[in-house]
Image (cartoon, rainbow, N blue to C red):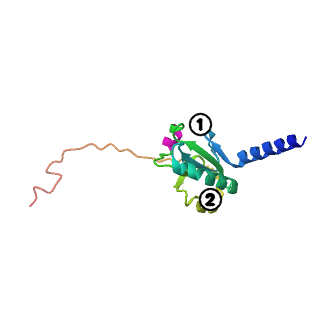
Amino acid sequence: MRTLQLITLTMLAVALNLQAGVKEVTTESDINKDGYAIVKFYADWCPPCKAFKPDFEELAKKYSDKGNFYAVNVDTQTDVSSKYNIQSLPTIGILLDNKLVEKVGRGELEEKLQNLKAPTKKVEVKKEVTKRKMSVVTETKTVKKQKKSCADCDCNKK
Protein backbone atom coordinates (compact mmCIF):
# COMPACT_ATOMS: atom_id res chain seq x y z
CA MET A 1 0.00 0.00 0.00
CA ARG A 2 2.79 2.39 0.93
CA THR A 3 4.61 1.67 -2.34
CA LEU A 4 1.46 2.44 -4.31
CA GLN A 5 1.11 5.80 -2.53
CA LEU A 6 4.76 6.63 -3.30
CA ILE A 7 4.30 5.75 -6.97
CA THR A 8 1.11 7.84 -7.14
CA LEU A 9 2.83 10.82 -5.49
CA THR A 10 5.82 10.48 -7.82
CA MET A 11 3.56 10.36 -10.87
CA LEU A 12 1.69 13.43 -9.61
CA ALA A 13 4.95 15.32 -9.08
CA VAL A 14 6.14 14.38 -12.56
CA ALA A 15 2.82 15.54 -14.06
CA LEU A 16 2.98 18.86 -12.20
CA ASN A 17 6.59 19.32 -13.29
CA LEU A 18 5.67 18.75 -16.93
CA GLN A 19 2.86 21.30 -16.77
CA ALA A 20 5.05 24.01 -15.26
CA GLY A 21 8.19 23.01 -17.10
CA VAL A 22 9.48 23.02 -20.63
CA LYS A 23 7.31 21.61 -23.40
CA GLU A 24 9.05 19.96 -26.34
CA VAL A 25 7.82 21.31 -29.68
CA THR A 26 6.99 18.73 -32.32
CA THR A 27 5.12 21.09 -34.67
CA GLU A 28 4.88 24.86 -34.90
CA SER A 29 1.28 24.72 -33.69
CA ASP A 30 2.55 23.43 -30.32
CA ILE A 31 3.73 26.94 -29.45
CA ASN A 32 1.08 28.95 -27.63
CA LYS A 33 -0.37 31.68 -29.84
CA ASP A 34 -1.53 33.94 -26.97
CA GLY A 35 0.75 35.70 -24.53
CA TYR A 36 4.45 35.16 -24.02
CA ALA A 37 6.33 32.07 -25.11
CA ILE A 38 9.96 31.59 -24.14
CA VAL A 39 11.52 29.24 -26.68
CA LYS A 40 14.92 27.59 -26.40
CA PHE A 41 16.36 26.51 -29.75
CA TYR A 42 18.90 23.72 -29.31
CA ALA A 43 20.52 20.66 -30.88
CA ASP A 44 21.38 17.34 -29.27
CA TRP A 45 24.99 17.53 -30.52
CA CYS A 46 25.55 21.03 -29.04
CA PRO A 47 27.56 20.98 -25.73
CA PRO A 48 26.46 24.51 -24.63
CA CYS A 49 22.84 23.48 -25.27
CA LYS A 50 23.27 20.42 -23.04
CA ALA A 51 24.90 22.52 -20.33
CA PHE A 52 22.07 25.08 -20.44
CA LYS A 53 19.23 22.52 -20.26
CA PRO A 54 18.97 22.26 -16.43
CA ASP A 55 19.20 26.05 -16.05
CA PHE A 56 16.42 26.58 -18.59
CA GLU A 57 14.21 24.02 -16.85
CA GLU A 58 14.81 25.76 -13.52
CA LEU A 59 13.91 29.14 -15.02
CA ALA A 60 10.77 27.59 -16.53
CA LYS A 61 9.65 26.50 -13.07
CA LYS A 62 10.61 29.77 -11.42
CA TYR A 63 8.98 32.04 -14.02
CA SER A 64 6.06 29.86 -15.13
CA ASP A 65 3.73 32.82 -14.43
CA LYS A 66 5.48 34.89 -17.13
CA GLY A 67 4.61 32.61 -20.04
CA ASN A 68 4.96 29.16 -21.50
CA PHE A 69 8.38 27.61 -21.96
CA TYR A 70 9.26 25.54 -25.02
CA ALA A 71 12.24 23.70 -26.45
CA VAL A 72 12.77 23.35 -30.20
CA ASN A 73 15.28 20.90 -31.61
CA VAL A 74 16.59 22.69 -34.71
CA ASP A 75 17.57 19.41 -36.37
CA THR A 76 14.08 17.93 -36.26
CA GLN A 77 12.02 21.15 -36.40
CA THR A 78 13.75 22.96 -39.24
CA ASP A 79 10.60 24.84 -40.27
CA VAL A 80 10.23 26.41 -36.81
CA SER A 81 13.90 27.35 -36.50
CA SER A 82 13.99 28.84 -40.00
CA LYS A 83 10.80 30.84 -39.36
CA TYR A 84 12.55 32.63 -36.48
CA ASN A 85 15.89 32.86 -38.33
CA ILE A 86 17.93 30.93 -35.77
CA GLN A 87 21.63 31.25 -36.62
CA SER A 88 23.44 30.10 -33.46
CA LEU A 89 22.85 27.67 -30.61
CA PRO A 90 21.54 27.81 -28.04
CA THR A 91 19.24 30.73 -28.81
CA ILE A 92 16.35 31.82 -26.65
CA GLY A 93 13.51 33.60 -28.36
CA ILE A 94 10.88 35.59 -26.53
CA LEU A 95 7.66 35.49 -28.51
CA LEU A 96 4.51 37.50 -27.94
CA ASP A 97 1.38 36.30 -29.68
CA ASN A 98 3.58 34.02 -31.82
CA LYS A 99 5.76 36.89 -33.08
CA LEU A 100 9.44 37.09 -32.19
CA VAL A 101 9.98 40.05 -29.87
CA GLU A 102 13.59 39.46 -28.93
CA LYS A 103 16.43 36.97 -29.05
CA VAL A 104 18.41 36.75 -25.83
CA GLY A 105 21.48 34.94 -24.65
CA ARG A 106 21.72 32.52 -21.74
CA GLY A 107 23.28 35.10 -19.44
CA GLU A 108 20.59 37.73 -19.90
CA LEU A 109 17.51 35.49 -19.88
CA GLU A 110 16.71 35.65 -16.17
CA GLU A 111 16.96 39.45 -16.10
CA LYS A 112 14.63 39.65 -19.12
CA LEU A 113 12.17 37.32 -17.44
CA GLN A 114 12.19 39.39 -14.25
CA ASN A 115 11.37 42.53 -16.22
CA LEU A 116 8.80 40.87 -18.48
CA LYS A 117 5.49 42.63 -18.02
CA ALA A 118 2.14 41.04 -18.68
CA PRO A 119 0.99 41.79 -22.22
CA THR A 120 -1.68 44.40 -22.54
CA LYS A 121 -4.95 43.33 -24.03
CA LYS A 122 -5.68 44.77 -27.41
CA VAL A 123 -8.96 46.61 -27.42
CA GLU A 124 -10.42 47.18 -30.81
CA VAL A 125 -12.24 50.45 -31.13
CA LYS A 126 -14.51 50.82 -34.07
CA LYS A 127 -15.31 54.27 -35.23
CA GLU A 128 -18.22 54.74 -37.48
CA VAL A 129 -17.51 57.24 -40.15
CA THR A 130 -20.42 58.99 -41.71
CA LYS A 131 -19.91 60.56 -45.06
CA ARG A 132 -21.75 63.67 -45.90
CA LYS A 133 -22.91 63.86 -49.41
CA MET A 134 -22.10 67.15 -50.85
CA SER A 135 -23.75 68.08 -54.04
CA VAL A 136 -21.67 70.28 -56.18
CA VAL A 137 -23.35 72.09 -58.93
CA THR A 138 -21.11 72.76 -61.81
CA GLU A 139 -22.10 75.11 -64.51
CA THR A 140 -20.92 74.38 -67.95
CA LYS A 141 -20.75 77.11 -70.49
CA THR A 142 -20.20 76.60 -74.08
CA VAL A 143 -18.04 79.31 -75.43
CA LYS A 144 -17.77 79.68 -79.12
CA LYS A 145 -14.51 81.02 -80.26
CA GLN A 146 -15.16 83.87 -82.60
CA LYS A 147 -12.69 85.42 -84.91
CA LYS A 148 -11.95 88.92 -84.00
CA SER A 149 -11.88 91.47 -86.69
CA CYS A 150 -9.76 94.55 -86.62
CA ALA A 151 -12.88 96.55 -86.09
CA ASP A 152 -13.26 94.93 -82.70
CA CYS A 153 -9.80 95.68 -81.49
CA ASP A 154 -7.50 98.62 -81.23
CA CYS A 155 -4.74 97.27 -83.41
CA ASN A 156 -5.45 99.61 -86.35
CA LYS A 157 -5.74 102.65 -84.19
CA LYS A 158 -2.47 104.34 -83.58
Mark closer to the chain start, 1 or 2: 1
**The disc labelled 2 sits on which kind of residue?**
Leu
The image shows a total of numbered marks equal to 2
**Which residue is denoted by mark 2 in the rendering?**
113
Q: Residues within 10 Å of mark 2 (few under 14, many from 20)?
A: some
Which of 44 and 122 lies nearest the eye of the viewer?
Answer: 44
Q: Element type at marker 2?
A: helix
Q: Is 136 left or right of 122, judged from the image as shown?
A: left
**Mark 1 residue type:** Thr
User: Observer-nearest residue: 46 or 24?
Assistant: 46
On the rendered image, what quadrant is the N terminus found in? top right
Give the percent coordinates (x, y) of residue 37. 62, 49
Q: Main secondary structure of the magenta part?
A: helix
Indicate the quadrant where residue 30 lies.
top right
Please provide the residue range marked out in magenta: 79-83
Q: Secondary structure at mark 1?
A: loop
Residue under the point 54% across and 46% down: 41
Q: Is residue 82 magenta?
A: yes
